[in-house]
Image: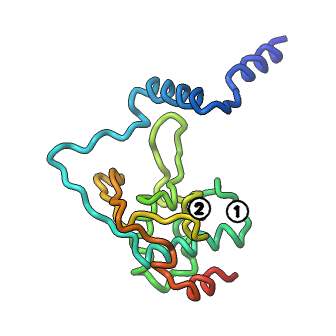
Amino acid sequence: MENKTNQLEKQEDEKIVKDLKEFNSIQDELVEKSKGKFVKTPKPANAKYVRKTLTRNLALCLIFVYKHYKYTLCETTDYFPKKVLLQYLKEFPNVTRNFHYLKYWDLIQQMPTSPDEVIYKKGWYGITENGISFLQKEIGLPKYAFVYNDFAFEHQPNPYVMINDLVEDEALEELLKP
């Protein structure tokens, strides 16, 4: 009897939401209950942004992250240490130095370690849908991100770049081969 009661409680907690307004309402309620844990605090008035640029080296890093996911049949929900994702680029240390900058454009994401706090496992990353779409030439991204305290607060919409602006089409095809 007790097991049946627990199952009913779990069913009440789980719900599929298909209506966008209801989803936004639930999301706002969760953010409010979290007491600001999931909301990035505003940049202090006297602090200055650092402008980061989406470069060819970052695009090359993303290509090898994508290859790892594509050819090892990983799920996009899997996370790996940076050294695994970039194992084919180890002879190019200058290319991988700023690998973590890809998160400023939501091309990779850090591995979360807590369901109720914003805490990430250092050095563990996964590819995002935006990362895949960018490599497949489905979306363009702003060239510049304005970062403060390791968080991209703003992006400059012009100029924007496509993957083939950073890596030539022939080189991209060659790099994406297994």
Look at 44% across and 25% down and name the residue there. 32
Look at 70% across and 27% down and name the residue there. 15
- Residue 59's disc number: none
Q: Name the residue under label 2.
A: 80
Q: Quadrant of residue 8?
A: top right
Q: Mark 1 points at which residue?
A: 74
Residue 55 x/y as whole percent = 40, 75
Q: In this view, does 9 lie above or below 134?
A: above
Neighbour tally class for label 2: few under 14, some 14-19, many 20 plus, Cα within 10 Å: some
Residue 160 x/y as whole percent = 41, 67
Look at 48% across and 28% down and name the residue there. 28
Q: For this view, does 46 lie left or right of residue 89? A: left
Residue 149 x/y as whole percent = 30, 52
| The N terminus sits in image quarter | top right
Look at 67% across and 33% down and name the residue there. 18
For mark 2, give the secondary structure. Answer: strand
Query: Which amino acid type corresponds to the residue marked 1 in the rendered image?
Result: Cys
Q: Is residue 135 above or below residue 76?
A: below
Determine if residue 174 is in view: yes
Q: In this view, does 5 lie above or below 95?
A: above
Determine if residue 84 is in view: no
Query: Which residue is at the front of the view, 136 or 74?
Result: 136
Residues at marks 1 and 2 touching, judged by CB atoms closer than 8 Å? yes
Q: How far apart are marks 1 and 2 (CA)?
A: 10 Å
Residue 97 x/y as whole percent = 40, 73
For mark 1, give the secondary structure. Answer: loop
